[in-house]
Image (cartoon, rainbow, N blue to C red):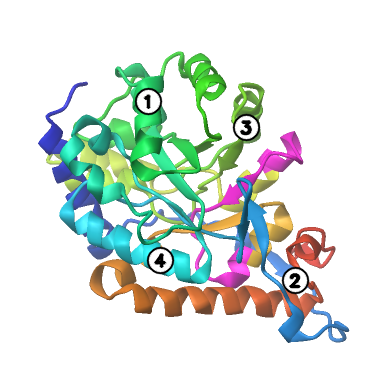
């Protein structure tokens, strides 16, 4: 479905407002991380001051194993949000994913809302295009343009089937996408990954994506924002609004999605996102096999209503929580956390 370009801008503004002010979390479904607990190590034989969060992602050294998950762009409000996020990410050493960049590719005058390198010169930046757009006249050149606009280190293709179905102006032709993704991956000058948007990626899908050459996976599991619910708030169709209630518990919990991808591959870089609330959730995700922990809507209010300093304090707290959990089990670094035997399923 072709859409007026200003409709894309309007939709993004509505997404921000709804995500901030409405109840858009799934119901009767969680991340599953609460089903795991760490066995404390009362004698860790390490100093808290020596616990290190550093590592690397997409070939770049990182001070922390954290990502600000893809959220927004394409409007003046979104620029301010992205500016705050970028300043904070640079300060704390987090990677950052941009919101869908379709608007910037289609409408050059919106490109500046995604151009965050001036505030984040050193951290990994991930550009973002909806995978379904490969069926709507997007191809190699448009994807390369998104990377160019953002001066990005990688591109992520987001998969959002149910969101598109419930979106009033959604694009719902997901047929024959895998072959197009495979072709794109082989031609792009930067790594290409795939992410869900809150419904999770199962092991069968992960296996097909890895076989197609995808270079990282963001599981974006259930337990956080439900984009079916976000779109239901935008809909003026009473029947669609009612139908959305049937999908309140739809999705694969984040913990199960991490496990599923790791059943398929021990090597593919994995980002754990979807409902993470604090650094202990991040610690559990990394211990399950993720390489990076992503935080999204939990950071949005500070980015919109406060400033970069408020975000920095929030991110510092999350880092402290992760470091404390690591100290509590005697893990000196991220590699030791990822190989710990002290994470048990309840």
Marks 2 and 1 sit apart, C-alpha to C-alpha, by: 39 Å
Reading the image, the residue beneath label 4 is 298
Report crowding for label 2: few under 14, some 14 to 19, many 20 or more residues within 10 A (C-alpha): many
Which part of the image, by quadrant, shows the C terminus? Answer: bottom right
Residue 21 x, y percent position in the rendering: 23, 64
Q: CA distance from mark 2 to mark 4?
A: 23 Å
Q: Is residue 239 left or right of residue 172?
A: left
The boundaries of the magenta stretch are: 260-282
Q: Is residue 65 visible?
A: yes
Q: Secondary structure at mark 3?
A: helix
Q: CA distance from mark 3 to mark 2?
A: 27 Å
Which residue is label 1 attached to?
132
User: Which tag is nearer the camera, tag 2 or tag 1?
Assistant: 1
Label 3 – label 1 distance at C-alpha: 17 Å
Q: Earlier in the sequence, mark 2 or mark 4?
A: 2
Few, some or many C-alpha atoms within 10 Å of disc 1 (few <14, some 14-19, many ≥20)? many
Q: In percent of the image, x 34 and y 54: which residue is there?
A: 116
Residue wearing tag 2:
38
In x, y percent, where is residue 91? 47, 71
Which circle, 2 or 4, is nearer the viewer? 4
Q: Which residue is mark 3?
A: 206
Which residue is at a point 56% across and 38% down the rendered structure image? 201
């Amino acid at each position: 479905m072709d859409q007026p370009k200003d409709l894309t801008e309007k939709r993004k503004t509505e997404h921000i407002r709804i995500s901030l002010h409405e109840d858009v979390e799934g119901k009767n479904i969680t991340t599953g991380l609460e089903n795991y607990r760490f066995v404390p190590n009362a004698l860790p034989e390490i100093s808290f001051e020596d616990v290190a969060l550093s590592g690397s992602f997409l070939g770049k050294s990182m001070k922390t194993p954290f990502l600000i998950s893809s959220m927004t762009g394409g409007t003046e409000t979104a620029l301010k949000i992205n500016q705050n996020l970028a300043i904070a990410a640079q300060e704390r050493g987090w990677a950052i994913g941009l919101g869908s960049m379709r608007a910037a590719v289609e409408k050059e005058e919106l490109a500046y809302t995604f151009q965050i390198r001036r505030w984040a010169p050193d951290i990994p930046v991930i550009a973002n295009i909806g995978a379904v757009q490969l069926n709507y006249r997007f191809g190699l050149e448009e994807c390369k343009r998104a990377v160019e606009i953002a001066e990005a280190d990688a591109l992520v293709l987001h998969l959002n089937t149910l969101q598109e179905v419930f979106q009033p102006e959604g694009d719902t032709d997901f047929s024959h996408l895998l072959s197009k993704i495979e072709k794109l991956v082989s031609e792009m000058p930067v790594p290409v990954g795939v992410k869900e948007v809150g419904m999770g990626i199962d092991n069968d899908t992960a296996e097909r994506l890895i076989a197609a050459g995808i270079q990282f996976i963001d599981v974006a599991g259930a337990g956080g924002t439900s984009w079916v619910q976000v779109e239901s708030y935008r809909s003026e169709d009473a029947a669609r609004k009612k139908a959305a209630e049937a999908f309140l518990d739809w999705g694969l919990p984040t913990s199960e999605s991490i496990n599923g991808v790791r059943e398929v591959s021990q090597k593919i870089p994995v980002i754990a996102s979807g409902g993470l609330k604090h650094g202990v959730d991040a610690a559990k995700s990394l211990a399950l096999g993720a390489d990076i922990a992503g935080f999204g809507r939990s950071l949005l209010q500070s980015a919109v209503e406060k400033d970069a300093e408020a975000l920095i304090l929030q991110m510092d707290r999350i880092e402290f929580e992760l470091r404390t959990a690591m100290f509590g089990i005697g893990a000196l670094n991220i590699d030791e956390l990822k190989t710990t035997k002290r994470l048990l399923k309840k």
